[in-house]
Image (tube, grey):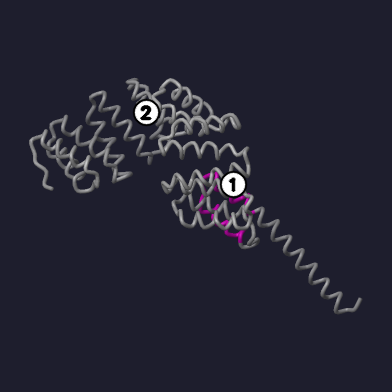
Amino acid sequence: MTGRNSKVIVLVLLATLSSGCNIVAAHFYNARGLASYHKGDYEHALTDFNEAIRLYSSFAEAFTNRGLVFDATGDYNRAIADHDRAITLKPTLALAFSNRGHVFYRKGEYDNSIVDYDKALRLDPSLASAYSNRGLAYYQKGDFGQAITDCSEAINRDPKMAIAWNNRGLAYYKQGNSVQALSDFNESLRLDPKSATAHTNRGLVYYSEKDLDLAISDLDEAVRLAPQDFKAYQTRGKTYEAKGDFDRAIADFSRAINIAPTLIDTYFARGICYQKKGNKEAAAGDFQWILRNSPSAADHSEAHKLLLQIGLKSSS
């Protein structure tokens, strides 16, 4: 072997060793990034996923994990781009399809979401989270029976998945089965007592069953756990209204509007509470806001009717 050939072999070995070290390091950063993501520390998670991808540019898992961060922070286009890249690099990666399905769900593209969950489950039928999330997409489409079927399959595969119990409870509630819905929310909260979503949903069931004190207890806990959960404030506001406590109802509706300023139903609810208190000016302000901002003819008709009830004409 010539001296020149020996040098070439050494250089190849060093390059291979360096590449192998980069891949090992990339897996370390990917794992640490996932740990940060699950803690809600998206800034550090993103930094680690970026480093993992820099070290190993064909790391499909790192791309789909970075997509999770973009999804969680509302950057849906970049999330989809990362999941697309992961799928291109590794077309058999079921989690990449499942993760992309979640982004489509967040964007309100429920059909695309279901298509991706279907693909994920064909690749990995044991993926319980994909069944649960697909069930939620069917729920949003109004197919509550299929939602229950999917969530039940998720529960069969992973009985400790609290969110699957919660999602199935929602579907049962929409079917009018409050008893089964309450049972599912109870189990969801047994598994995850700090789930603000499950507290909100169980509070909704109690409200609909006129167990108003139990509803408020759950909704108090929901807003304590998740102070930016506008749905909890909405539902607690309705519960206070049902108890005749219009001041607290108005306060909760106002909090919900501060968090999500385009909530048409909440403007209606707050306006009606103002009307019940005899505050015609404030009620008119909410109904006029609806006339200015809602594209719905039905909303306009209802707002006009409410304005007439308080002896005012709309300005539109």
> Disc 2 residue type?
Leu
Q: Is residue 231 above or below residue 105?
A: above
Report the span colored magenta. 29-53
Q: Is residue 96 magenta?
A: no
Q: Nearer the viewer, residue 154 or 182?
A: 154
Left or right? Give the position of 229 relative to 55. Answer: left
**Figure quadrant of residue 314:** top left
The residue pinned by badge 1 equals: 95
Whole-percent x, y for residue 28 in the image: 66, 53
User: Within 10 Å of the Cα at label 2, are there few (<14), some (14-19), or many (20+) other Cα atoms?
Assistant: many
Q: Main secondary structure of the magenta part?
A: helix
> Disc 1 residue type?
Leu
Left or right? Give the position of 304 relative to 238. Answer: left
What residue is shown at x 48% (from left), y 50% (from top)? 71
What residue is shown at x 31% (from left), y 39% (from top)? 256
Q: Nearer the viewer, residue 121 or 43?
A: 121
The residue pinned by badge 2 equals: 204
- Of marks 2 and 1, the one in the foreground: 1
Query: Distance of mark 2 from mark 1, alpha carbons?
Result: 32 Å
Query: Element at badge 1?
Result: helix
